[in-house]
Amino acid sequence: MKCPHCLVEFHDKVNTIEIGNDVEGSWEILSRKCPNCMKNIYYLRNITYNTVNLKGKADKEVISQFLIRPKIANRPPVPIEVPQEFASDYREACLVIADSPKASAALSRRCLQHILREKLRIKKKDLFQEIQEVIDNGLLPTDLLESIDAIRNVGNFAAHPIKSKSTGEIVEVEPHEAGWNLDVIEMLFEYLFVRPIAIQRKREALNAKITDAGKSSMQ
């Protein structure tokens, strides 16, 4: 797994601590320690037991599982090249995805709309139409266009368009659908913010070498 503290991959033994039962089933804590940062990771898990299997034991079924320490998203940090006005909604969408995928999806859609309006200068009455204009005008590479288009199918979003850049409508989504929204925003961050600055830095470095050699710099 990837440590949610330091984001380093590791394999370690999982310790399970049973903490009680109630009308919703049995509850237990899953505990692991990252060998890199030496910090503990805890999950709260709700389980139930089904019919007895061939070995005479009841099969365990996981109803839900939540990361309770640390209270952060298992996502890479936002690149420093991304302005705070775009990074804030993304970070919050990451933080709430485990507790409320639909709230996370609403925040990530708002973040996406803000990116399209401010970086690509697309302004329609709702996000659904704004995505369509980006596709129709080919304003992004094909893989990104296909990825953004898929967002319109998340939680039947086509029937629940966002009506302004500051208001997100809450619609039912699956956790993996909310996660896809975040994946798309990460791809946009890389293409629209990180890559242009990296290219500019390389060009400046090359121009410095060309100038030192007594030649005219690249335009």
Image (cartoon, rainbow, N blue to C red):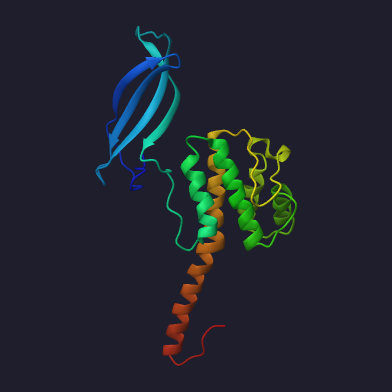
Q: Is residue 205 above or below residue 120?
A: below
The number of numbered badges drawn on the structure is 0
Q: Residue at x 50, y 59 (%)?
A: 84
* Residue 47, x across and y down, in percent: 41, 19
Q: Image quadrant for the C terminus?
A: bottom right
Front one among 66 and 7 = 66
Q: Is residue 26 above or below residue 71?
A: above
Q: Is residue 218 above or below residue 2?
A: below
Residue most toward the front? 166
* Residue 200, x across and y down, in percent: 51, 73
Q: Residue at x 33, y 33 (%)?
A: 42
Q: Is residue 189 left or right of residue 214?
A: right
Q: Image quadrant for the N terminus?
A: top left
* Residue 38, x across and y down, in percent: 24, 43
Q: Is residue 65 left or right of residue 183?
A: left
Front one among 200 and 102 = 102
Front one among 217 and 101 = 101
Q: Residue at x 55, y 51 (%)?
A: 185
Where residue 154 sits, quadrant-wise, is top right
Where residue 54 sits, quadrant-wise, is top left
Q: Residue at x 45, y 93 (%)?
A: 214
* Residue 171, x across and y down, in percent: 64, 35
